C-alpha cells in the first residue's frame, strides 16, 4: 500500500464532543485524539449542487500506521484544512496500515 518513507505529512485526528451551551442546547467541540505521520493523497475535486448553490468537495485518501480508534464521525486536520472522515479500512488485512477516505468541503 505504502512505505514508511511516504509518511511525510502531519495530520491531527479529532473526535467530536457535545458541550452544553448553557441555554438547554449544545454545540460540538473537537478534541484532539492524536497527531500522526501520514501519506496524504488528493483526488480530483468535484462540485455538487446543494440547496441551490455549488459546493466544492475535494476527496482525499490519508494513509497512517494502523489504529483501531478511527471512526467515521471523526475528522482530520491537515495544513489548516478540515477533512471529514467518510470511512477507514485496513487495505491488506495485516493491521500495518489504515487508509482513511476523507472529504474537504467548501473552500
Image: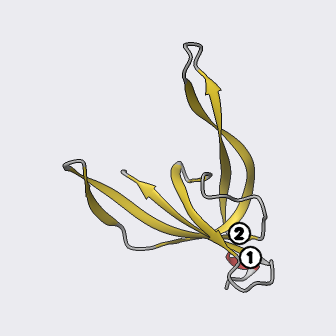
Q: Position of residue 61 (x, y in %)?
A: 55, 71
Front-most of 11 and 69? 69
Q: Position of residue 59 (x, y in %)?
A: 45, 67
The reply to whether the C-beta atoms of the residues labelled 1 and 2 are less than 8 Å apart is: yes
Q: Residues within 10 Å of mark 2 (few under 14, many from 20)?
A: many
Q: Would you say 82 lies left or right of 55 here? A: right
Q: Which residue is mark 2?
A: 64
- Mark 1 is surrounded, within 10 Å at the Cα level, by few (under 14), some (14 to 19) or many (20 or more) other residues, namely many
Image disc number at residue 97? 1
Residue located 36% across and 51% down the image: 106
* Numbered label attached to residue 34: none
Give whichever of 42, 26 is nearer the camera: 26
Q: CA distance from mark 1 to mark 2?
A: 6 Å
Mark 2 element type: strand
Say what secondary structure mark 1 lies in: strand
Name the spot of residue 30 as percent of width and height, x first.
63, 39
Describe residue 1's horizontal placement relative to residue 103 as left or right.
Answer: right
Residue pictured at 74% horizontal, 76% vertical: 97
Amino acid at each position: 500500500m505504502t512505505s514508511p518513507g511516504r509518511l511525510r505529512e502531519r495530520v491531527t485526528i479529532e473526535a467530536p464532543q457535545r458541550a452544553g451551551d448553557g441555554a438547554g442546547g449544545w454545540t460540538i467541540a473537537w478534541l484532539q485524539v492524536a497527531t500522526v505521520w501520514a501519506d496524504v493523497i488528493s483526488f480530483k475535486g468535484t462540485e455538487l449542487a446543494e440547496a441551490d448553490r455549488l459546493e466544492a468537495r475535494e476527496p482525499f485518501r490519508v494513509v497512517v500506521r494502523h489504529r483501531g480508534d478511527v471512526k467515521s464521525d471523526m475528522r482530520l486536520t491537515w495544513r489548516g484544512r478540515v477533512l471529514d472522515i467518510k470511512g477507514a479500512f485496513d487495505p491488506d488485512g495485516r493491521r500495518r496500515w489504515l487508509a482513511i477516505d476523507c472529504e474537504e468541503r467548501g473552500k
